[in-house]
């Protein structure tokens, strides 16, 4: 299975080792902005049909790598596979995003939840990881991922996306014990899920805490941070150069970088509301940093994109004692369907050209 890795920039940067160029990949790099993705999706019938078919998941995972000089692949799947496998029954409504047929809104329904079996209930995900590793043939490393316990709970309680997170915030106030029970079973499931992806061949792992930033600081420190820390502490991922690194990505996590950098994770992903240099100063070299271009930068013209890329690269280096090491270039959040693929090429090439050591 394990062909020799031809491009290990991404893994070296996560270990804060020297690299020839800053590695780059983009959240949602496989998606609707690519015409070939839209064609695959049309042929498959739906997003879920694609994600649940390992060969199709592999096909779309590789699509952005054929176009751009990316330094990592990310498994094509979704964070909502775990609650789906717990029995909440995931579906998508065109234009409305993900929904659950059976949301959990009280202690009784939470008490019934259990950790899904990774090689039966979620076998399609592990098969996709194995297929992608084989087809990648060592070109670049493969990133596996999961949602954070809090971000999964948001969708599980709200029953889908939300603007104000009214239901789950009410649960935090009125029945914190039930919410902790939900976060606890989610954490057990996330740890088992990431361990299974690692066993299937994932070479790095990322947790998406997309909605951690909607919490007040006290609530973040009660309902999100401790569970992220438990994942970083308990997830078995090997030692030394063979260790599978873990990245904790969060939107709105700038205020918590000190704590996140002491969680035990190898990397922290940040959004664009903080200068990367400030993030580097606050984390003092304890972790690699991933980020952090505003995704809407891709709506700019090529020269504007290049200028923003150089700013982020230089900001990191200034905050990191003059060194570009320990930085993985990315957006601060995922790409959108109406973005221009050519602009992604401009971004990726500028990262590599400007950061060449
Ligand atoms: O980054 C990648 O290229 C890997 C694949 C990936 C997807 N979703 C594919 C996807 C990853 C890592 C995710 C994570 C995910 N899914 C998150 C966390 C990161 C983030 O972006 O905040 C969240 C909150 C979800 C839940 C989810 N799934 C949403 C909000 C949507 C969009 C719904 C919509 O209609 O816009 C999805 C569906 C989804 N997941 C798509 C893709 C490419 C679009 C599906 C389609 O083709 O219609």
Image (spheres, rainbow, N blue to C red):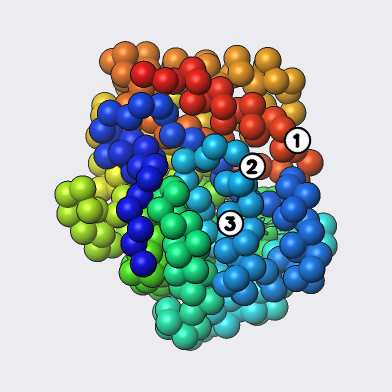
- In the displayed structure, does residue 139 sit left or right of residue 13? right
Badge 1 element: loop
Check the image and name the residue furthest to the left: 240
Image coordinates of residue 271 in percent, x first then y, are 52, 34
Q: Earlier in the sequence, mark 2 or mark 3?
A: 3
Q: CA distance from mark 1 to mark 3?
A: 18 Å
Horizontal and vertical percent position of residue 239: 17, 54
Q: Mark 2 sits on what residue?
A: 67
Residue behind mark 3: 61
Which residue bears the numbered disc 1?
340
Marks 2, 3: nearer the viewer: 2
Mark closest to the chain's N terminus, 2 or 1: 2
Q: Nearer the viewer, residue 164 or 151?
A: 151
Q: Secondary structure at mark 3?
A: helix
Would residue 72 be found to the left or right of residue 2 on screen? Answer: right
Question: For the point 71% across and 43% down, which residue is it?
Answer: 336
Label 2 residue SS: helix
């Amino acid at each position: 299975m394990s062909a020799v890795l031809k491009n290990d920039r991404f893994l070296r940067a996560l270990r804060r080792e020297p690299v020839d160029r800053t590695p780059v990949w983009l959240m949602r790099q496989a998606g609707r902005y690519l015409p070939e993705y839209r064609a695959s999706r049309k042929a498959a019938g739906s997003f879920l049909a694609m994600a649940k078919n390992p060969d199709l998941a592999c096909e779309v995972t590789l699509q952005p790598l054929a176009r751009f000089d990316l330094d990592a692949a990310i498994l094509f799947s979704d964070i909502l596979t775990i609650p789906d496998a717990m029995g909440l029954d995931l579906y998508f409504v065109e234009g409305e995003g993900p929904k659950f047929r059976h949301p959990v809104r009280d202690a009784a329904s939470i008490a019934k939840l259990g950790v899904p079996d990774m090689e039966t209930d979620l076998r399609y995900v592990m098969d996709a990881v194995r297929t992608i590793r084989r087809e990648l043939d060592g070109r670049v490393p493969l990133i596996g991922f999961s949602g954070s316990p809090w971000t999964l709970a948001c969708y599980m309680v709200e029953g889908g996306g939300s603007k104000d997170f009214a239901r789950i915030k009410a649960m935090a106030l009125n029945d914190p014990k039930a919410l902790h029970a939900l976060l606890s079973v989610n954490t057990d499931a996330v740890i088992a899920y990431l361990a299974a992806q690692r066993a299937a061949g994932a070479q790095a792992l990322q947790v998406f805490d997309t909605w951690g930033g909607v919490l007040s600081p006290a609530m973040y420190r009660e309902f999100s941070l401790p569970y992220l820390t438990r994942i970083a502490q308990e997830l078995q991922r090997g030692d030394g150069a063979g260790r599978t690194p873990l990245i904790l990505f969060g939107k709105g996590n700038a205020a918590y970088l000190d704590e996140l950098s002491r969680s035990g994770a190898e990397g922290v992903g940040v959004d664009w509301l903080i200068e990367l240099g400030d993030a580097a100063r606050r984390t003092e070299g304890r972790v690699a940093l991933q980020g952090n271009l505003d995704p809407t930068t891709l709506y700019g013209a090529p020269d504007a994109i290049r200028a923003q890329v150089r700013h982020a690269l230089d900001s990191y280096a200034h905050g990191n004692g003059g060194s570009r090491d320990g930085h993985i270039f990315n957006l601060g959040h995922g790409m959108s369907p109406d973005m221009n693929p050519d602009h992604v090429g401009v971004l990726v090439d500028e990262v590599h050209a400007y950061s060449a050591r």
